[in-house]
Image: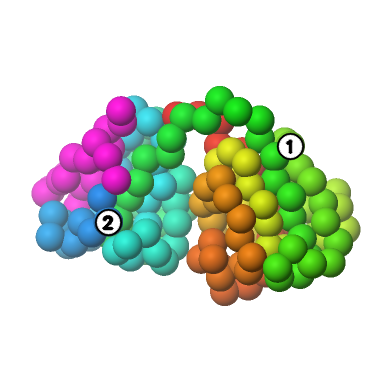
Amino acid sequence: MGKIIFYEGRNYEGRHYECSGDCSDMHSHFARCNSIRVDSGCWMAYEKPSYSGYQYMLNKGKYPDHHRWSGFNDCIRSCRIVPTYTGKFRMKIFERSDFGGKMTELSDDCPNVQDRFHLRDVCSCNVEGYWILHEHPNYRGRQYYMRPGEYTKHSEWGSTSSTIGSVRRITES
């Protein structure tokens, strides 16, 4: 379905681990990750085991050092492939937990949530399709992988803050 290779050294040097599906704990395969090559598929890589910590979306391509995938450090401990989605993309975002407060609906990418919707905080959402929430406008900062479903509070998608700057659909796989 997909193929991703993690390397300990920069520029694809040193020990490596090849993966073709979800892996919840990769610590036994390499000590650190300084380069990645994605041969096929769209992937989410995570700083910690069990799909937690910093999250990084990786499309097909080469990442010769951890700065190329916007890595905060050289630690990758789990990954999952993003499934192909052929349905309608839709996300309802709410300014309060448990689907409370102002509701806004998106069906396309939004580089600046605050400018477009006058909404700074996103505390809950209902998701159709696969999306990435970004901490800052213009798809910068921490990333949060959103799978189809309901999220009643921002901690359910791994965030410690309700501040969302931009939103992007995952259309590649």
Q: In terms of depth relative to the viewer, which is nearer, 145 or 30? A: 145
Q: In terms of depth relative to the viewer, which is nearer, 71 or 87? A: 87
The amino acid type, in three-letter code, at marker 1 is Ser
- Please tell me whether residue 13 belongs to the stretch shown in magenta: yes
**Residue 126, position as x, y percentages in the image:** 67, 52
Residue shown at the point (27%, 33%) measured from the top left: 3
- Please tell me whether residue 150 belongs to the stretch shown in magenta: no
Residue shown at the point (68%, 56%) measured from the top left: 125
Q: In terms of depth relative to the viewer, which is nearer, 133 or 63? A: 133
Please identify the quadrant where the C terminus is shown: top left
Label 1 residue SS: loop
Give the answer, above or below, for where 55 lies relative to 14: below
Give the answer, above or below, for where 10 lies relative to 123: above
Q: Which residue is mark 2?
A: 24
Per the rendered image, the range of residues in magenta is 1-22
Q: Is residue 71 visible?
A: yes
Q: Which mark is residue 107?
A: 1
